[in-house]
Amino acid sequence: MTNGHDDQIVVALRAAARNLAQRQGIRDLEETLHQIVASAVETIPGVDAGSLSMTEQGRIDTRHPTSDAIGKLDHTQSELGEGPCISAIEDPPESGVVLAQDLAGTDADRWPRFAPHAVEAGYRALLSIHLATDGSLRAALNLYSATPNAFDDHSRVFAGLFGVQAGLLLYGAHQAHHLRRAVDNRDLIGRAKGILAERFGVDDDAAFQMLVKSSQDTNLKLTAVAQWLTESTGTSAARSGHDPS
């Protein structure tokens, strides 16, 4: 590698990772996703636009595209079931990097249904990087260029490194998101058990069993039953002028 240009890229990459790690957004999944895309587009040479593709429960969604056109192209890949983004998520190579250097030329036959859509939208090259997370979440960082052969060896190496950093950040944010939701659900169920214990004169275990039985009988999630109970109790208390606490 040559010195000056590469050094600048390394500095930019480190700054981007540091910027992501320092933001409070790491505790907020959507903010973290937005920053991953913005930092990648700004940092990696040759990139004109970007997005994230994520799949949970078998469905691939586009997150934080830098333009409506990019969002549409990602959606087209999902509908067609082919494209670099799909390959990076469902069948990534060992490097995690899927590269299309010219969708109007040498790479047109690799994704014959998607390639014409990308070219028509003005994008000739596409670099998709698999983001290693956990089994319940698979994702890819998608980097578009209007110029064919825009991604040289340096771009691919730094995109791969960025993908490692971004994958770790995404994993952390995803875990924090679910942890926060678990804590919120626990607090919600705790409030619901307290309401039942006071209303029916039962202990904590019996109140929980009442919630479980109600969940089974209504075919609703336990948290949905707890939410309904706390909200209806709060509404009744407000109407009667009493504080439910």
Image (tube, grey):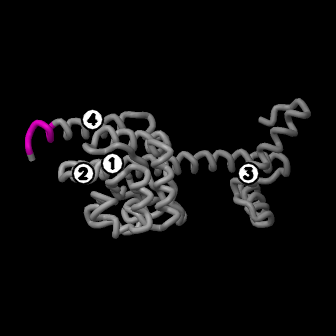
Q: Which of marks 1 and 2 is nearer the N terminus?
A: 1
Q: Residue at x 9, y 47 (%)?
A: 1
Residue type beneath disc 4: Ala
Residue 123 in picture, x, y percent from top left: 37, 51
Of tags 4 and 2, the one toward the viewer is 2
- Asked if disc 1 and disc 2 are in contact, CB closer than 8 Å, the reply is yes
Q: Is there a contact, CB below 8 Å, between mark 1 and mark 3?
A: no
User: Range of the magenta residues?
Assistant: 2-7
Principal secondary structure, stretch drawn in magenta: helix
User: Going 49% across and 66% down the picture, which residue do you hit?
Assistant: 80
Mark 1 or 4: in front is: 1
Q: What residue type is labelled 3?
A: Ala
Tag shown at residue 234: none
Crowding at mark 3 (Cα within 10 Å: few <14, some 14-19, many 20+): many
Q: Name the residue under label 2.
A: 151
SS for dot 4: helix
**Mark 4 surroundings within 10 Å by alpha-carbon count, few (fewer than 14), some (14 through 19), many (20 or more):** some
Tell me, for residue 145, which label it has, or none.
Answer: 1
Q: How many neighbours does mark 1 have within 10 angstroms: few (below 14), some (14-19), or many (20 or more)?
A: many
Based on the picture, tell me whether residue 5 belongs to the magenta stretch. Answer: yes
Where does label 4 land, which residue?
Answer: 15
Residue 40 shown left or right of residue 199 in the figure:
left
Q: Where is residue 174 in the image (x, y as percent from the top left)?
A: 47, 50
